[in-house]
Image: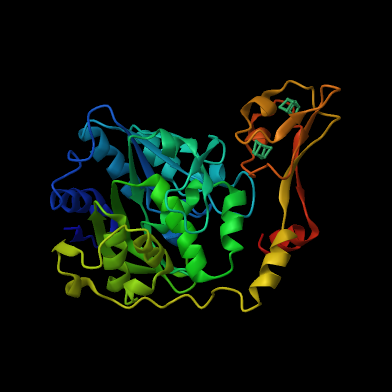
Amino acid sequence: MNKVSIVRCPDYSNTKRAIAEALELLDGLENIIHPGDRVLLKPNILAASPPESAVTTHPLVVASMCEFVLQAGGKPVVGDGAGISRPGATSKALKVSGIEEAARKAGAEVVNFETAGFALVNVPDPLQFRKLYIANPVLEADVVISLPKLKTHELTYYTGAVKNFFGVLPLKCRKEAHLLGKRDLFGEAVADVYSVVRPGFAVMDGVIGMEGNGPSHGKPINSGVILASQDCVSLDIVAAEMIGFDPLKIPTTVGVMKKGFGNQCPVVVGTPLKDVKMKFKPSSGGVSTAPSFLTHHLGKYYKIYPRINRRKCTHCGACHLNCSPHAIERLEDGSFRINEEKCILCYCCRELCPNNAVEIKKSLLAKLLTEMTT
Ligand code: SF4
Ligand code: SF4
């Protein structure tokens, strides 16, 4: 039986109490955390937005969960990789969202997926991807907990506990998933990620949600709840229904259920679902109406890629040694070159280079689009 707890939380001053109650209704975290476990808490840190814009999981939700993980004997680690448009976005998003400071004060380690390295793993029963690069901190964790924000989403209608794990991919894999060009196929790609990560718990920040043009341009809406579950799929079913969406039409939920996760009829404990139901305005965005071959073709011309500036490079080899997919090749003359085919766009090389020799180049289409969005 997959239980989902719902607890009213009218504002963030009640966060810790509400999460404590939501956990208590599910017999606490002690069932899933063993003393000494490394517990990765994965909030939604989509962009460099302050807490009041409701784009990211509220820092008080993250801080409270760090404290509860510590109480259960675990070592909290908070991490994510921000959205797909630019390198360096995660470190800014960690700061502006208030999550880095809140997590550190609560005793957690904070990791930036963009720069922590990735490992290539096999996907069990793949739907779209046989192999995926996954951020190392996720693979190194004993327990993974999703901390999503309750929001609408232009591509998946609703974004919650399952979709939250899209952030564990490097930018190249995210781009490939988006280029699938259809909601159901994208949902299957997220399901492939989910089947590798296999989270053990989820706590959703539904205190202030986002309706309309989510996940980043919608309107904050007071939804006043904390939801929790040992099963991310069940949590998503209940949360989607709560905001007036058909849970079984959410592409990520359909995708993970196709892979055998979740249960169509979760049991709600705590506040009855009917007492907190509301209607979120859906996103007016969505998949492109252009034919998928065209989207795919255009997508190939959207490139933001690293390039080594030979004049600045001192051949120290730090980037070469730390590139997860071994995309930085040493040439006969001792210099280095980035193999674009192998590069997964994690930008670790840029972070590591002591001489600022790794520069970011953009294709014309990327220049045009990123200028339009800054
Ligand atoms: S070349 Fe740089 S950006 Fe590309 S995969 Fe290697 S470390 Fe990441
Ligand atoms: S880390 Fe920088 S200086 Fe060192 S080899 Fe790579 S590009 Fe050159």
The spot of residue 210 in percent (x, y) is: 41, 67
Residue 44 seen by the camera:
no
Residue that appears at 46% across and 62% down: 188
* Image: 121 above or below 332: below
Snapshot colouring: rainbow
- Name the image quarter holding residue 286: bottom right
Q: Nearer the viewer, residue 346 or 133?
A: 133
Q: Is residue 269 left or right of residue 180?
A: left
Q: Is residue 174 left or right of residue 374?
A: left
Ligand 1 placement by image quarter: top right
Q: Nearer the viewer, residue 131 or 345?
A: 131
Q: Nearer the viewer, residue 296 or 36?
A: 296
The spot of residue 108 in percent (x, y) is: 36, 33
Residue that appears at 69% across and 36% down: 327
Residue that appears at 45% across and 51% down: 193
* Image: 234 above or below 103: below
- Name the image quarter holding residue 256: bottom left
- Name the image quarter holding residue 32: top left
The spot of residue 44 in percent (x, y) is: 43, 52
Residue 172 seen by the camera:
yes
Q: Residue furthest front?
A: 125
> Where, quadrant-wise, is the N terminus in this rendering?
bottom left
The spot of residue 245 in percent (x, y) is: 34, 76
* Image: 84 above or below 318: below
Q: Is residue 115 left or right of residue 232?
A: right
> Where, quadrant-wise, is the C terminus in this rendering?
bottom right
Residue that appears at 31% across and 57% down: 261
Number of marks present in the image shown: 0
Q: Nearer the viewer, residue 32 or 296?
A: 296
